[in-house]
Image (spheres, grey):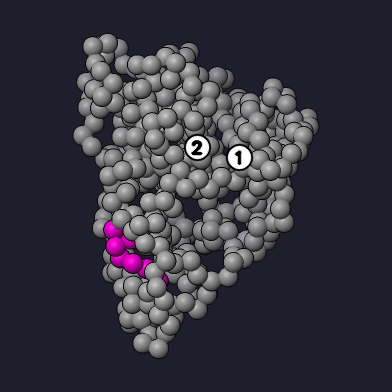
Amino acid sequence: MALRVKALESILVEKGMVDPATIDAVIETYESKIGPRNGARVVARAWVDPAYRKRLLTDGTAAIAELGYGGSQGEHMVVVENTPTVHNLVVCTLCSCYPWPVLGLPPTWYKSAPYRSRVVIDPRGVLREFGVTLGDDVQVRVWDSTAEIRYLVLPERPTGTDGLNEEQLAALVTRDSMVGVAQVSASRRVTA
Amino acid sequence: MNSIHDMGGMHGMGPIEVREDERPFHAEWEARAWGLMRAVNPFGPNRRRNFRYEHEILPPVQYLQMQYYERFIKVLVDRLLEAKVLTQAELDSGRADPASPRVTPRVTPANIAEQIARRRSLRRDDVRIRSKFKVGQRVRARNINPVGHTRLPRYMRGHLGTIVSDHGVFGFQDTDAQGYTLPDRPQHVYTVSFTARELWGDAANPRDTMHAELWEEYLENT
């Protein structure tokens, strides 16, 4: 595959159909500007600012834009909140729809047949595979991104984090917790 | 179309590979493939087949075997060949035909950021249509089996659900049998919730629900 992509790129560059510097710029954007650290900042803000949390759950697109995030694949954002009795989980069974401005490009497992096929028929089994076991008193809500809405899960703030500031909280928030396949742990910091 | 891409509810796809860090690309070629997709000049006819449809018509075995960015590259190459912007001989030799026309790249480092930040909403705020369904109303997902691209997954067809929200009017994305967008058919899009038991039977958890955003014409009164 590496050789085929390289050959295609060099042919198109020769023809003037593409500028390799633009490809570099795209890669740089998705590697360092657009990714799950954006979503983590949204989540941390919602945890420390109740008024922001309310705006986020009412109009996700506008509240996310307050932090400067938006654009392609984030045009219509809906934020769904995990609580002690509700656990949300996001999928795109038909393809790979995903909220790029806040989470970046989707991970391989999100686009894979095992996840897309099973998460709607056996969400609790899928969660167990990710290490999350939910009680029978918890309702699981699966959101299949079939149209133009993109979803962000607002995970529960872990206990024992009262002393942390917004930035420290953001460092705890994983990509997987914002798709709904993980919970946020007070002891696990993300190295981005 | 009822093919392998519409896989919600299928068994036998194996375990999920969950160990993965948060980097977007895990090989150089994936990054180059993605960048190429976004950076290539517009080409070919204005009226073209739906991009997702072109993935969906891949033979199921190929669809499952190909890696994600490999599929994107295949669709791009097929389009380039079809538009005669690229030839098989060029692909085989790895060099552009010296006689082929030279153009100037139109997507530049300067304007790509603007492209990525641009909203490309399909919402049609210019169209005023009264919604047929109200929040809280019971509806049935129609039993339709179109051969073109559709956004109504098979596992929801024929099942009873409840309207949770109305997102307003959006352009319809289904295509005809050849993958071309249908004549303009803006309509309301709703989030509809289905209970796991309605979709999967009595063995499913009684609390769990599945939601999707569905265009109005996918739904009917109960």
Kind of residue at badge 2: Arg
Residue B219 image offset from top left, x and y in percent: 72, 37
Instruction: Say if the magenta span includes residue B9.
Output: no
Within 10 Å of disc 2 (Cα), the crowding (few <14, some 14-19, many 20+) is many
**Mark 1 to mark 2 CA distance (whole Å):** 20 Å
Rendered position, B175 above or below B88: above
Residue at the spot of label 2: A150
**Which residues make up the magenta segment?**
A17-24
Residue A13 drawn above or below residue B100? above
Q: Position of residue B36 (x, y in %)?
A: 37, 62
- Kind of element beneath mark 1: helix
> Which residue is drawn at the image coordinates 65% and 43% (left, top)?
B124
Residue A3 sits in which quadrant? bottom left
Mark carried by residue B155:
1
> Residue B213: where, in percent of width, then height?
60, 36
Image quadrant in which the C terminus of chain A is located = top left
Instruction: Tell me if residue A13 can be seen.
Output: yes
Q: Secondary structure at mark 2?
A: strand
Q: Position of residue B171 (x, y in %)?
A: 65, 47
Q: Magenta region's main secondary structure? A: helix
